[in-house]
Amino acid sequence: QRVDEVDRRARLPKEIADMNKQIKRVEKLLVSKKKSLQTVNTVLGLNTSIFAELLSNIKGTVTEADRFLKAGELEDASETLQEIHGGGLNPGGLEGIIHELTNLATNVKRAKDQNIISQIRTLIAEPFSFVVEGDLQGANESFNEARNDIYRLLDQGLKRTSKTQSKK
């Protein structure tokens, strides 16, 4: 038990500092990608306001863990951080999802083919449902499963768009 306490005392401050850095990065990302997130809303039909809510939840949990740490309650601090790790809700995962969706939306917007866009929206709905539930790990796993199909459809849509534009 003493070893655990020494480990927590050494590990927790760095872990909290790292998470706070990730939170700041995601906050900046939400500002810098505001227009791209609007494209995600419009093109993919996803409500990206959930990202700010999730980030707020993460930030609150990290702040609570930091309070426990400063009060010397190492076990409570560790358990609080476990909510983030165990619950699949971490700032790095959120950052990855934001990048993935903004890149996808930008490409889907270029595809123009409404049938393809509709199919991509259907494929992205399940991974995004995990986001809404606050399970970023589940969202990433689900997106990984759907990625090949999504990008195959996107490639078809972009080829059709390119052919249509060359005929003009």
Image (cartoon, grey):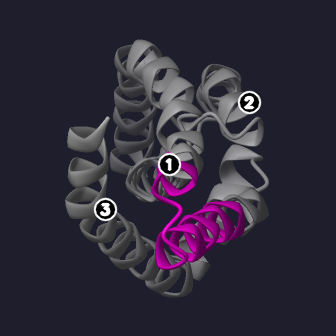
Query: Extreme front residue here?
Result: 2
Residue toward you, 82 or 121: 82
User: Rounded to the nearest whole Å, what is the CA distance between mark 3 and mark 1?
Assistant: 14 Å
Mark 2 or mark 3: which is in front? 3
- Magenta run includes residue 132: no
Chief secondary structure of the magenta portion: helix
The mark found on residue 129 in the picture is 2
Identify residue for label 1. 75
Say whether disc 2 or disc 1 marks the residue closer to the N-terminus.
Answer: 1
**Residue shown at 54% from the left, 54% from the top:** 109
Q: Is residue 23 left or right of residue 13?
A: right
Where's residue 75, x and y in %?
50, 48
Bounds of the magenta segment: 55-78
Where's residue 142, x and y in %?
51, 19
Q: Mark 3: which amino acid? A: Glu
State whether residue 14 is above or below residue 102: below
State whether residue 154 is above or below residue 6: above
User: Contact (CB < 8 A) between labels 2 and 1?
Assistant: no
User: Rounded to the nearest whole Å, what is the CA distance between mark 2 and mark 1?
Assistant: 32 Å
Say whether disc 2 or disc 3 marks the residue closer to the N-terminus.
Answer: 3
- Magenta run includes residue 59: yes
Identify residue for label 3. 15
**Residue shown at 61% from the left, 20% from the top:** 123
Question: Tag 3's secondary structure?
Answer: helix
